[in-house]
Amino acid sequence: MCEHFEHIQTHTKFVVLMHPKEFKKVKNNTGHFTHKSLTNSELFIGIDFSDHKRINEIIDTHNSYILFPSTNAINLSDEKPKRSSKPLAIFLIDSTWACTKKMFTQSSNLNTLRHMSFVSERTSAYEIKTQPDKAYLSTIESTLVVLELLKKHEIEDINAEKLDGFLNPFLKMIEYQKELINNPKSHAVRFKRHTKSML
């Protein structure tokens, strides 16, 4: 999927916090895609980040928010993040909802972050994975909405073509997975030939 990344540069730092279960499942999940697509991003794997030196450093030096819907969250669809002399950082949790709660419970530093949310009419294109609700979006889809809203608020100035292509690796991955599901024997032959060529 590497050829499909846009590699977008942002003023905002994006921090992807990935649960170990997501990391073990597959290396081309949407958390990885998000990290690879954003030049100013960092990815960390774990559950309890309370004493994580680099994460605490980012929190201390940035105007930090975490993308999490709550009654106290600022709605990015209508509101700008509060002005600050520090650069903006947005933390993204890449995990199931159940595991997300555990990460929040165990990571005391994440509980200090202000929450950010948005309202969107998008529905997930993640056809090969069942979402808990039709309004739920994958990590990379949620990040695209955030990027569009940051541009709307003139916090970011991202080329429209790059935004249009942001989901390309995600969509190509889905297309590839659907092909495997529909033509498993074809994939087995290709894999066998590929393996032989590497020996």
Image (tube, rainbow, N blue to C red):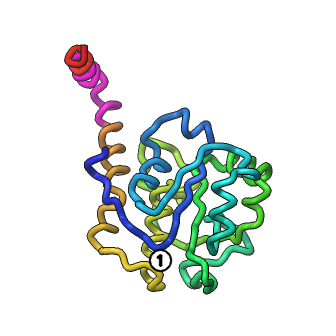
In the depicted structure, whether residue 52 falls above or below residue 83? above
Query: Residue at point 73% right, 46% down?
Result: 48
Residue 49 magenta-drawn?
Answer: no
Q: Quadrant of residue 122?
A: bottom left
Q: Main secondary structure of the magenta part?
A: helix
Q: Which of 188 and 14 lies nearest the eye of the viewer?
A: 14
Q: Is residue 69 left or right of residue 119?
A: right
Q: Quadrant of residue 66?
A: bottom right
Q: Quadrant of the C terminus?
A: top left
Q: Is residue 146 left or right of residue 184?
A: right
Where residue 117 appears, as percent x and y from the top left, is 61, 71
Q: Which of 119 and 18 lies nearest the eye of the viewer?
A: 18
In the depicted structure, whether residue 181 falls above or below residue 1? above
Q: Which of 159 and 178 lies nearest the eye of the viewer?
A: 159
Residue that carries the numbered disc 1 in the rendered image:
149
Q: Quadrant of the N terminus?
A: top left
Residue numbers of the magenta segment: 179-193
Query: Residue at point 61% right, 54% down?
Result: 93
Q: Residues within 10 Å of mark 1 (few under 14, many from 20)?
A: some
Where residue 169 appears, as percent x and y from the top left, is 33, 50
Give the amino acid type for the residue marked by disc 1 in the picture.
Leu
